[in-house]
């Protein structure tokens, strides 16, 4: 009984802060914890604020590209590692864990230094032949995000590959399917839920990352960078409105993904 | 089929499959980390940034940021421990006591907050712990001048809040896998419920506790947002020192030395910890056989 009470307490602990954000997003007043009546003003202001909409578009572009590239490269890598033995495979295993364990702040720093070093080396030559200088932009953020998320995708896909029923693959081979047909008709459908999970995770991690983008985004502002700097400038319900909108959208997308997977499972 | 293919062609396919990932790892992980290590032996250029040199000065200078190391190395383990203490009873409730039909829903409800932005969740705690939140309620019952925000307590509360979901899941999995017949056997042999818990349930769930602690510890060691928002720049971690060194004071070689030290501490801790957990696991398996 007391355990049930404890569980209830933890759920309140988990959800009260989120409820607070949502509640004060409808505040008519200007200050975060000072209720002045109901209003949708802050939603209007947030989504007509050109800085916010531009940051949102930037974040969506980064997260979308990161998720696509990390999922493709990660899935290929997991399939390749399955066929590999020996020291090279151990090297990849080690690299995957290093990529996950190195803190985001260090990934930000090391990629920043690497980009700056390359830019300093290449830019004089590019200028000499009249081409544009290389500089920090969305692509530097995407590259750094892919590095981290690629490792996550490999782990997810490999967990699924390890749990896969090998006899299906063997049956397909016995029935004279080419390796590619076996891949397309047996392996890929079995991997699809994990590929989707990897895609969603990469998208979320990239969309919500602050620290790596803080280092390598150059003059660009992503949504987390905007939210972080507004929190430090002093809080207004505008942040609550942005947060609530993002929260509802991501929950809706997660439920949609869940629904699609279930529908697929029923169809099979 | 695969075996009958010429093995050289099969090797080419394998290489092509892993090559893109290999290029990412080479150019964005290995080479950058090597450059950081090289920088850590360099000198600061006049206008900030890096000037080539070979000196151990940056490492000798690490105590200048000693407070950041002390804060990280006390609050990260402490935060991990508190998260275990808060997560374990919930995981136990979910795995053993919860209603079967509600279990999945309750599990999903633990994970959902983890999918919402970390920035926003800490922002909510700024409101709750700030002067208009809990301290103002405490003042109302006569406890004036309580300050929580920008103290180590705020950082610890944030750590438990932020990482509880990540801790509950692995503990839940290990408790769920636990063979319930062992509990019956323990009861049949005359152990009461607390004794069964301490001698059977808890030891068998330690692998889950170890996995969760590892995850949370790694993430806490590299935190920047949590100490920045809830510690208000007063309770700063190594991550905050790094942002300052690279983006404000622009002392890159010293920052590189601090990064190298952080990563080295993390890898040593993880290696020692894995060794300890794995060797314990072996003795436990041996004891069960």
Image: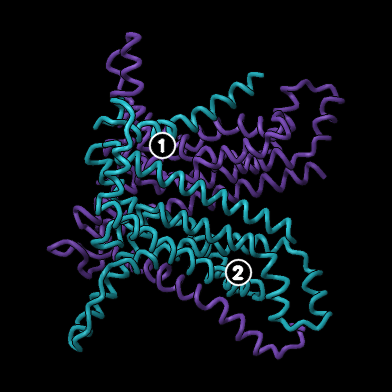
Task: List x then y, in percent, for residue A265.
Answer: 71, 57
- Furthest-right residue in view? B188
**Towards the viewer: B126 or A256:** A256
Q: Colour of chain B?
A: purple
In the figure, residue A7 lies in which quadrant? top right
Residue at mark 1: B75
The chain identifier of the residue carrying mark 2 reads A
**Towards the viewer: A177 or B41:** A177
The chain identifier of the residue carrying mark 1 reads B
Q: Is residue A251 above or below residue B4?
A: above
Residue occupying image coordinates x 32% and y 39%? B229
Task: List x then y, in percent, for residue A233.
Answer: 22, 41
Is A129 situated left or right of B139 in this image? left
Residue occupying image coordinates x 74% and y 24%? B195
Is A61 situated left or right of A100 in this image? left
In the figure, residue A212 lies in which quadrant? bottom left
Numbered mark located on residue A78 in the image:
2
Q: Secondary structure at mark 2?
A: helix
Task: List x then y, in percent, for residue A223.
Answer: 33, 52
Is B273 situated left or right of B283 in this image? left
Q: Secondary structure at mark 1?
A: helix
In the figure, residue B94 lies in which quadrant? top right
Is the residue under label 1 in contact with that under label 2 (CB below 8 Å)?
no
Labels 2 and 1 share a subunit: no
């Amino acid at each position: 009984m007391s355990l049930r009470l404890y569980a209830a307490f933890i759920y309140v602990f988990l959800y009260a802060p989120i409820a607070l954000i949502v509640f004060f997003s409808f505040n008519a007043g200007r200050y975060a914890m000072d209720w002045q009546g109901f209003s949708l003003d802050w939603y209007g202001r947030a989504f007509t604020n050109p800085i916010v909409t531009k940051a949102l578009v930037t974040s969506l572009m980064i997260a979308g590209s990161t998720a696509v590239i990390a999922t493709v490269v990660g899935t290929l890598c997991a399939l390749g590692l399955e066929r590999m033995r020996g020291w090279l495979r151990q090297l990849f295993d080690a690299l995957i864990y290093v990529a996950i364990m190195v803190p985001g702040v260090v990934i930000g720093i090391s990629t920043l230094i690497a980009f700056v070093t390359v830019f300093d080396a290449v830019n004089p030559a590019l200028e000499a032949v009249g081409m544009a200088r290389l500089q920090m932009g969305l692509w530097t953020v995407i590259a750094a995000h892919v590095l981290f998320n690629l490792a996550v995708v490999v782990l997810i896909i490999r967990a699924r590959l390890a749990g896969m029923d090998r006899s299906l693959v063997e049956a397909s081979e016995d029935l004279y399917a080419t390796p590619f047909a076996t891949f397309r008709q047996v392996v890929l459908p079995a991997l699809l839920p994990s590929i989707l999970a990897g895609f969603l995770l990469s998208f979320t991690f990239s969309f919500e990352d602050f620290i790596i983008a803080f280092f390598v985004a150059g003059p660009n502002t992503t949504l987390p960078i905007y939210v972080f700097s507004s929190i430090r400038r002093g809080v207004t319900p505008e942040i609550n409105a942005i947060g609530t909108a993002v929260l509802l959208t991501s929950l809706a997308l997660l439920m949609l993904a869940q629904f699609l997977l279930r529908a697929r499972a029923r169809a099979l | 089929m695969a075996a009958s293919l010429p093995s050289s062609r099969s090797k080419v396919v394998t290489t092509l499959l892993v090559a893109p990932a290999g290029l990412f790892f080479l150019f964005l992980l290995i080479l950058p980390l090597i450059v950081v290590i090289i920088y850590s032996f360099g000198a600061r250029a006049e206008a900030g940034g890096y000037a080539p040199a070979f000196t151990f000065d940056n490492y000798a200078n690490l105590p200048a940021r000693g407070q950041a190391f002390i804060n990280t190395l006390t609050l990260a383990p402490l935060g991990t421990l508190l998260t275990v203490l808060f997560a374990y009873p919930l995981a136990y409730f979910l795995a053993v006591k919860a209603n079967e039909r509600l279990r999945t829903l309750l599990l999903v409800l633990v994970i959902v907050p983890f999918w919402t932005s970390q920035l926003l969740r800490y922002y909510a705690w700024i409101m709750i712990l700030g002067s208009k939140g809990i301290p103002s309620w405490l003042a109302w019952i006569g406890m004036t001048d309580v300050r929580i925000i920008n103290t180590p307590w705020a950082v610890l509360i944030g750590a438990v809040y932020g990482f509880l979901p990540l801790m509950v899941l692995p503990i839940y999995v290990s408790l769920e896998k636990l063979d319930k017949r062992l509990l019956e056997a323990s009861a049949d042999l005359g152990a009461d419920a607390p004794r069964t818990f301490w001698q059977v349930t808890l030891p068998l769930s330690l692998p889950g506790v170890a996995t969760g602690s590892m995850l949370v510890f790694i993430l806490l060691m590299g935190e920047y947002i949590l100490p920045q928002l809830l510690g208000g720049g007063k309770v700063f971690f190594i991550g905050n020192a790094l942002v300052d060194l690279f983006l404000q004071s622009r002392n890159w070689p010293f920052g590189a030395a601090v990064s190298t030290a952080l990563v080295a501490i993390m890898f040593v801790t993880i290696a020692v910890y894995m060794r300890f957990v794995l060797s314990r696991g072996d003795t436990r398996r041996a004891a069960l056989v």
